[in-house]
Image (cartoon, helix red, strand yellow):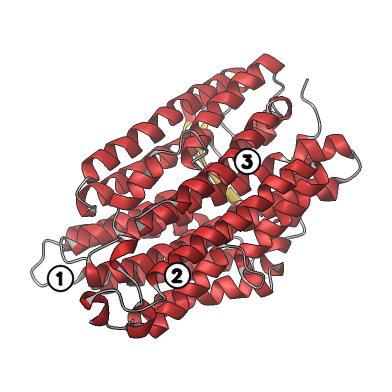
Amino acid sequence: MSNLPLLSFVIWLPIVGGLIILADSEREGSNPRPLALAFAMVTFLTSLLLYSGFDSSTAAMQFEEKASWISAFNVYYHLGVDGISMPLIILTTFTTVLVVLAGWEVIKDRPAQYMAAFLIMEGLMNGVFAALDAVLFYVFWEGMLIPMFLIIGIWGGPRRVYATIKFFLYTFLGSVFMLVALIYMYSKSGSFAILDFHLLKLGLTEQVLIFLAFLLAFAVKVPMWPVHTWLPDAHVEAPTGGSVILAAIMLKIGGYGFLRFSLPITPDASHQLDWLIILMSLVAVVYIGFVALVQQDMKKLIAYSSIAHMGFVTLGIFLVFTLMDNNPNDLQGAVLGMQGGMVQMISHGFISGALFLCVGVLYDRMHSRQIADYGGVVNTMPVFATFMVLFAMANSGLPGTSGFVGEFLVVLASFKADFWFAFLAATTLVLGAAYSLWLVKRVVFGDVGNEQVAKLEDVNGREILVLGSLAAVVLLFGIWPAPLVEVMEVTLQNLVAHVTISKL
């Protein structure tokens, strides 16, 4: 198994699939949907082989592939996964299958191009998670923007041009600084291998500058407060599938960047500036929670909720130094925060993706995202209402759902670090419950608001399949998080041990 190029397969198969669908789209009577689903399914099943063949007792990179690419600059086509990146690849491949199914009947305009864009996007995102060479990482990282740009710009809402340009400029600007940092480290080490960067000796000033360059790139992606403003616009204008991918995977790439680059390459700078990240995270979880409360548009509300939940992730990741300062022997406490951040990333992928799909189901029927246009949906769509209430509960962190596990671990770690961190982090649980349940109350419950709601039809078999599979995953990881936690345990222990050793 380990001899097979599985990683190349999960990267290139969807990209090739997307190109085949594009080439076939010109043919009379071509139907891209079954083909797109076949490619997405095969990619997902291949990614499950990564899980089954994964050795969770080691922190070393697994399923490695290495070939020379640009030999003049020592650039290699180098792939590998560990306990951090492997779950994220499976999340990507699983979500793509659901996105293809969700757009099955809805997308009437250029369905071949729509499906192809998502498949190519899937390959590039898997590439970001698997790349162990900085140039390769950067190519995939920038490449991802293009399909997303097209998805929002072609199939988006009325203000789509504004949203796409804002999304592109924000994310591109951050990336330029990251490129400069990568080139600087190459000039120091003579290699573009990310694992060589981890061992590179850097002075404090160098580390701080590199840390800030990475921060600009990853904070925009997460998005952290105050560079979050592109996300609500992008979400509102994006088609349902675009919103799902944005929320479920693209935001995670920022969190992944912190774990793969910022912490191991610049540990001293991360230690010096951890207060900044913790401050930004706590502002995000509290302030953005209040912003979510006042939204009138369902998509905007879930978009702001995503920013608040991702604040939890960055908080969990950067608590490591405070915890180590408080008790240098308590390695497990530091690992706890990171585990919480990672579980929160994966679980948020499922929950926010599911909420956007719920909004998509309503939008397909009534062509409105305004909360005021709904009310009493449970009377006409009882099955749908059940799903929506479950996902809203999971979003507010109900025990028994995956949303609880990550938040609980982060609050536990923040309590060990500082009471006030825990207090502020816990307020978000209350706020999360407030806006999630208030959304449900206004949309789902109550009397039937208008004639349109009275005519609504309940979810069909395809929609039940999509929402049901997400509900199953949310409940599975809520009741039994062990498969997720065990896979990343050793990798995160190794990362904490690496981060606590100074490079100065």
Residue, disc 3: 282
Q: Quadrant of the N terminus?
A: bottom right
In this rendering, is residue 223 above or below 27? above
Q: Which residue is mark 2?
A: 441
Task: Kindly tell me whether residue 104 is visible in this rendering.
Answer: yes
The residue that appears at 35% across and 42% down in the rendered structure is: 145
Which sits in the foreground, 18 or 487? 487
Q: Nearer the viewer, mark 1 or mark 2?
A: 2
Left or right: 262 in relation to 30 = right
Query: Of the residues under marks 3 and 1, which one precedes in the sequence?
Result: 1
Q: Nearer the viewer, residue 301 or 112?
A: 301
The amino acid type found where label 2 is placed reads Lys
Q: CA distance from mark 3 to mark 2?
A: 27 Å
- Give the labeled residue for mark 1: 30
How packed is label 2: few (under 14 Cα within 10 Å), some, or many (20 or more)? some
Please, what secondary structure does the residue beneath circle 1 have? loop
Q: Nearer the viewer, mark 3 or mark 1?
A: 3
Image coordinates for residue 468, horizontal then vertical, percent: 46, 79
Closest to the camera, between mark 3 and mark 2, is 2
Label whose residue precedes the other's in the sequence (1 or 2): 1
Reply above or below: 216 against 111: above
Q: Secondary structure at mark 3?
A: helix
Picture quadrant of residue 66: top right
